[in-house]
């Protein structure tokens, strides 16, 4: 006869064992569940840090074989870490740990450390939606957040932006910074709610104050474009810098651009090259192209066509059209 199922403190599904009928057995079972929760939390936090809660897709496993180890060490380390994270989520999913289903589904869509597998992604999407829906009565900010995400992206269900916003708001009530960001994103693009740049700015700022780099980047964009707030290039630079100093490659490239063209900051080519290089070493294609341009033009760095070709090639292999154009000209 199959063992009945019980729920762990973090709502994972685990098989009930006869040993749990004793006080000692129940204590051991609780320790096991705490261990599973700790494993999941460590993996999910690392996944969120690298991908910005699944936001970034630029970590194809084949990129482990491009460039030199020295130039792309941070990038390759992130890909390797994502492979380890994927395995951890897979192991947890195999024993019915429900919270692992959604990140597994997202990772299997590709460009996050493993090859694309749409069939497996769809399987875990269905499992994730079922599990999250079953546990939505629990007062858990991450379950609410993930429900917003699956409804917003149509993961295991039909896309429903209005319902996505409902669940983001529920998560926001518990203080989740990612939910604040995604709610701001819906206001920014007018998805599920009426487009409102001031509301978008409000939610981005709350998430940014909690250190979420993607929210900091969107604040920069709003300051730069004067959407929902008075245009202020210096404020845009300040928020790019906050995200860049946390290691966000998108922000590092944008900050490099600000220094190169003197937007919101005194023009400084050395700073531009430094920030482009930081982002390029993390595998950011546009930064690799920008660094290639610096070498091609001899801007701050000594003119070096070989280095230009090298960085253009890395960017081109990631699909950067400008880099591919210049590669064609150089050949």
Image (spheres, rainbow, N blue to C red):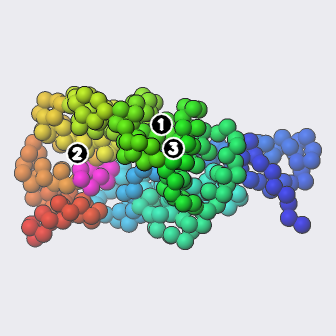
Disc 3 is placed on an element classified as helix
x and y percentages locating residue 169 in the rendered image: 54, 38
> Which residue is at the front of the view, 32 or 322?
322
Q: Residue 328's spot in the image, x, y percent?
A: 12, 69
Image coordinates of residue 154 in percent, x first then y, are: 52, 58
Between disc 2 and disc 3, the foreground one is 3
**Marking on residue 165:** 3
* Disc 1: which residue: 180
Name the residue beneath numbered marker 2: 276
Chain-order first, disc 2 or disc 3: 3
Crowding at mark 2 (Cα within 10 Å: few <14, some 14-19, many 20+): many
Residue 283 magenta: yes
The residue lying toward the viewer, choosing from 171 and 323, is 171
Quadrant, the N terminus: bottom right
Identify whether 197 is placed above or below 279.
above
Q: Report the front residue among 55 and 307.
A: 55
Q: Position of residue 98 (x, y in %)?
A: 67, 53
Q: Is residue 98 shown left or right of residue 165?
A: right
Residue in the foreground of this view, choosing between 164 and 280: 164
Q: Residue at 51% of width from left, 48% of height from top?
A: 162
Between tags 1 and 2, which lies in front? 1
Is label 1 in a helix, a strand or a loop? helix
**Residue located at (36% from left, 32% from top):** 198
Alpha carbon distance from label 1 to label 2:
29 Å
Q: Residue at x 25, y 44 (%)?
A: 253
Quick check: 269 above or below 126? above
Q: Residue at x 33, y 56 (%)?
A: 69
Disc 2 to disc 3, C-alpha distance: 36 Å
Q: Secondary structure at mark 2?
A: helix
In magenta segment, residue 317: no
């Amino acid at each position: 006869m199959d063992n009945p199922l019980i729920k762990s403190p973090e709502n994972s599904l685990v098989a009930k064992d006869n040993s749990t009928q004793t006080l000692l057995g129940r204590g051991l079972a609780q320790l096991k569940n705490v261990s599973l929760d700790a494993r999941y939390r460590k993996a999910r936090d690392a996944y969120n840090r690298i991908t910005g809660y699944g936001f970034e897709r630029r970590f194809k496993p084949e990129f482990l074989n491009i460039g030199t180890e020295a130039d792309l060490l941070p990038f390759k380390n992130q890909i390797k870490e994502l492979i380890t994270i994927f395995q951890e989520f897979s192991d947890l999913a195999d024993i019915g740990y429900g919270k692992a289903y959604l990140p597994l589904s997202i990772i299997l869509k590709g460009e996050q450390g493993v090859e694309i597998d749409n069939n497996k992604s769809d399987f875990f999407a269905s499992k994730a939606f079922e599990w999250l829906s079953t546990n939505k009565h629990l007062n858990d900010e991450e379950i609410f957040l993930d429900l917003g995400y699956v409804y917003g992206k149509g993961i295991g269900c039909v896309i429903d932006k209005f319902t996505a916003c409902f669940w983001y708001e529920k998560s926001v009530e518990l203080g989740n910074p990612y939910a604040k960001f995604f709610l701001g994103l819906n206001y920014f693009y007018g998805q599920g709610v009426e487009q409102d740049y001031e509301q978008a700015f409000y939610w981005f700022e709350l998430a940014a104050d909690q250190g979420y780099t993607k929210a900091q980047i969107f604040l920069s964009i709003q300051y730069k474009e004067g959407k929902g707030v008075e245009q202020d290039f210096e404020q845009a630079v300040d928020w790019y810098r906050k995200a860049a100093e946390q290691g966000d490659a998108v922000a590092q490239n944008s900050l490099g651009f600000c220094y190169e063209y003197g937007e919101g900051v005194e023009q400084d080519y050395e700073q531009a090259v430094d920030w482009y290089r930081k982002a390029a070493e993390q595998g950011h294609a546009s930064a690799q192209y920008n660094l290639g341009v610096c070498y091609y033009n001899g801007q701050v760095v000594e003119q070096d066509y070989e280095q230009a070709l090298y960085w253009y090639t890395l960017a081109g292999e990631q699909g950067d059209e400008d880099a591919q154009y210049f590669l064609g000209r150089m050949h």
